[in-house]
Amino acid sequence: MKKIVLLLTCLLFCGSQEIKAQPRNANTETKQQQAVNSPSPVLRQSPVNDAAEAASEAYRKERDAKDDVFRDEEVRQGRIVSTATERIFWATAFYVFVTAIYAAFAFLTLKQIKKQATNTGEQLEAMKKQSRTMRGTWQVMRRQTEAVEKQLEAINKQEAHLSAQVEAAKEAADMAKGQLVAMQSQERAQYQALEAAKGQLDAMKAQAKTMDQSLVFGTRAYLGIQSVNLDIASKRLFLYIENVGKVPAKDVMVVTEIKAEVPETKYQSFCSQQPQIQHWGQREGERRLQIPFLDRLGRTKVFPGSLRIPVMIRLDESPYMSDQQFSLITGGYAKFTMRGLITYSDGFHSGKRTEFAFRYFGKNNLWVPEVIEGPQIQTDPEKPDSDYSPN
């Protein structure tokens, strides 16, 4: 039966090839007829047109020659196919006759086979079911095997990659170890150089500080009381400030406190006949007077040299200084002292200060320096000026 089907397929194929050859020949003949019947355009007679026409005619002849060859080849192939088809037909007829005889014998055999097939049908169905089950199991096992193979391949690749990374890391570690040893050596050398430089820097800082202090001490301003004068006629006290340094002093402020002490009996003998404006305070058999004064020079600077800056204290405006009370001081009956503080800055430091204390001897009209008693006057510590940065 398989051979019969094969012969019938060959017959159908040969017939289709013959049918296809006929339209191709018809199309070729139609194209040739159109080429013959199509009018050629009339061109103006000129050498260029003659050359073009000759070239076109040559191309047309060449194309016709190729078409003739192609048509002859198609005719030859058509004849071959027709002859082969005829021979196949007679061979097929003979084969069909032989097959009919074979079919008769096969019919008898088929009856026997059908009996056996009936007996083995149930077995075949069971085997088919078992085969399908086994096939499904095999497919699952195959997919699992493929997955395991892929995983194994990935693991092998990862292992190779990790091995390469381990080697690279080992090389990098060895290189880093060498670099670390070199860096440690450099660090020790740098530390030694740093220690040496630090010692030099400390020495230079100490030297610079000493030089700075020498500069400050040698060129700073020094303010003090050059002299004190009490004008008895005007009842005014003058303090003359002098700068014995080498730079001007600024922000000068003078704080002065005068103090008078006289026994009660002496005070009463001088001040009992005429009423006074204000009496001095009484304490332990004495009369005492203590008055503070504050003078600011503002932006006036005290330059070094022979110029003396006077600071005036007007006792004549004090309600505690009547003529009788003032005579206690000028006559030498009262202990009259003066203490104070001068604060200033000189461009190096602000908050510089100079304390002073004097006692007046009225009979001699003389001011004598006195030991500064009592607690030290508290002021802010010296600070560098805005235009000076010490090392």
Image: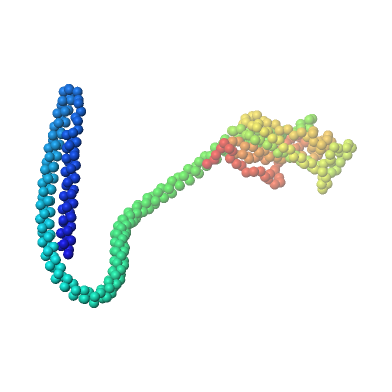
Could you tell me if residue 163 is visible in this image?
A: no
Task: Tell me what residue is drawn at x 79 percent, y 34 percent.
Answer: 317
Toward the viewer: 5 or 135?
5
**What is the x, y in percent for residue 77?**
12, 48
Toward the viewer: 119 or 220?
119
Task: Tell me what residue is drawn at x 88 percent, y 39 percent.
Answer: 272
Task: Tell me what residue is drawn at x 20 percent, y 28 percent.
Answer: 41
Q: 115 above or below 234? A: below
Tell me how the rendering is colored.
rainbow
Q: Is residue 376 left or right of residue 132?
A: right
Q: Is residue 127 left or right of residue 251?
A: left
Toward the viewer: 189 or 258?
189
Could you tell me if residue 322 is visible in this image?
A: yes
Q: Quadrant of residue 125?
A: bottom left
Q: Quadrant of residue 30?
A: top left
Q: Is residue 269 left or right of residue 232?
A: right
**What is the x, y in percent for residue 264?**
84, 44
Q: Quadrant of residue 8?
A: bottom left
Q: 330 above or below 136? A: above
